[in-house]
């Protein structure tokens, strides 16, 4: 018996308008297809501008794709109207690179985490408080941090709040866009361990966008290499780079050279 993947992306096309007055439109994503199972991590890697974030936005339906299909948990998302999509959104949640930028500076942590519940119609404040306390505990934060504002948290704590907020609606898929690259190296492994622990406990699927090949090999199950809007190679994350004659390995090693330079640059824009 074959089980349907949680996420199935087929022939995805995202075209951005050209940036200059005479600039031609950019096919940022040009026929991308992949599957992702529940409990699995697929890492999308590739040099800057190859279309990783555009793919992520189209999967999240933050940016409607120009063509192609995005089937999630048996439902085709590209044809859903906005009210129907709002009901699906809690199940597919993003976690962004900049933990401060993804939280409102004026909302206390407990309100930031509870906000999506209220947006989706929750009127039971006591139940919301209980859920927030449960989530703070789940992401390894002390309940007292619930009273703080984002600027009163460290980068790692702030990213944990972002993860708690993503979890509040009971998602099945998280789209992780460089989730630790803006963090101090000393707290990165804690956040990564939290993500792998949450995946094991909750059966979450992760679409991971990351520049750091060493990290990707450690946390992902499969890797897809993008270039110029296309997936040019894909395969298992573990045991890769063992046969230099293999095209997938060659692609990864080539990526590692450009990607490492990008990762160095990323580290220079650390948040507080
Ligand atoms: N809103 C936009 N308008 C016009 N062009 C865009 C827009 N967003 C992205 N692009 C272009 O689309 C292409 C793919 O960009 P995208 O951000 O998806 O790549 P990426 O692989 O995520 O890059 P990075 O690793 O630097 O974030 C690039 O040529 C980029 O300049």
Image (spheres, rainbow, N blue to C red):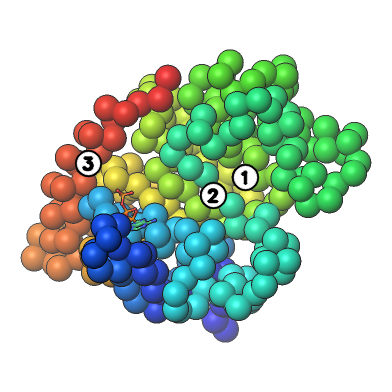
Q: Position of residue 133 (x, y in %)?
A: 76, 30
> Regarding mark 2 in the picture, which secondary structure is present there?
strand
Residue at the location (8% across, 65% down)?
Answer: 245
Lateral position of residue 109 relative to residue 56, left or right:
right
Q: Position of residue 173 (x, y in %)?
A: 57, 57
Whether 191 is drawn above or below 257: the answer is above
Label 1: few (<14), some or many (≥20) within 10 Å?
Answer: many
* Closest to the observer, 237 or 115: 115
Q: Which residue is mark 3?
A: 262
Q: Which residue is mark 2?
A: 94
Pointer 3 residue Cβ closer than 8 Å to ligand 1: yes
Q: Which residue is mark 1?
A: 166
CA gap between label 3 and label 2 equals 22 Å
Residue at the location (32% across, 60% down)?
Answer: 51
Q: Which quadrant does the C terminus fall into?
A: top left
Lateral position of residue 8 relative to residue 257, left or right:
right
Quarter of the rendering containing residue 68: bottom left
> Regarding mark 1 in the picture, which secondary structure is present there?
helix
Whether 258 is drawn above or below 251: the answer is above
Q: Position of residue 226 (x, y in %)?
A: 27, 62
Lateral position of residue 250 relative to residue 174, left or right:
left
> Regarding mark 3 in the picture, which secondary structure is present there?
helix
Asked if disc 1 and disc 2 are in contact, CB closer than 8 Å, the reply is: yes
């Amino acid at each position: 018996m074959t089980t349907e993947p949680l996420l199935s992306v087929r022939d995805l096309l995202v075209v951005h308008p050209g940036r200059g007055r005479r600039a031609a439109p950019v096919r940022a994503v040009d026929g991308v297809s992949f599957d992702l199972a529940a409990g699995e991590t697929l890492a999308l890697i590739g040099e800057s501008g190859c279309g990783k974030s555009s793919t992520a936005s189209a999967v999240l339906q933050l940016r409607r794709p120009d063509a192609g299909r995005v089937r999630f948990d048996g439902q085709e998302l590209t044809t859903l109207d906005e009210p129907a999509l709002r009901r699906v959104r809690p199940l597919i949640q993003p976690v962004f690179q900049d933990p401060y930028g993804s939280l409102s500076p004026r909302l206390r942590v407990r309100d930031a985490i509870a906000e999506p519940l209220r947006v989706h119609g929750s009127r039971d404040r006591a139940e919301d408080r209980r859920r927030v306390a449960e989530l703070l505990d789940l992401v390894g934060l002390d309940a007292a941090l619930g009273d703080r504002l984002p600027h009163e948290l460290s980068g790692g704590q702030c990213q944990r709040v972002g993860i708690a907020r993503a979890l509040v609606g009971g998602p099945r898929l998280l789209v992780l866009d460089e989730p630790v690259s803006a963090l101090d190296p000393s707290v990165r492994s804690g956040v990564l361990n939290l993500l792998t622990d949450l995946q094991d406990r909750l059966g979450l699927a992760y679409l991971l966008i990351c520049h750091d090949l060493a990290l990707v090999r450690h946390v992902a199950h499969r890797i897809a290499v993008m270039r110029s809007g296309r997936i040019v190679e894909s395969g298992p994350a573990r045991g890769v780079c063992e046969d230099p004659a293999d095209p997938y390995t060659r692609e990864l090693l080539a990526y590692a050279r450009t990607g490492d330079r990008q990762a160095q640059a990323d580290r220079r824009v650390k948040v507080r």
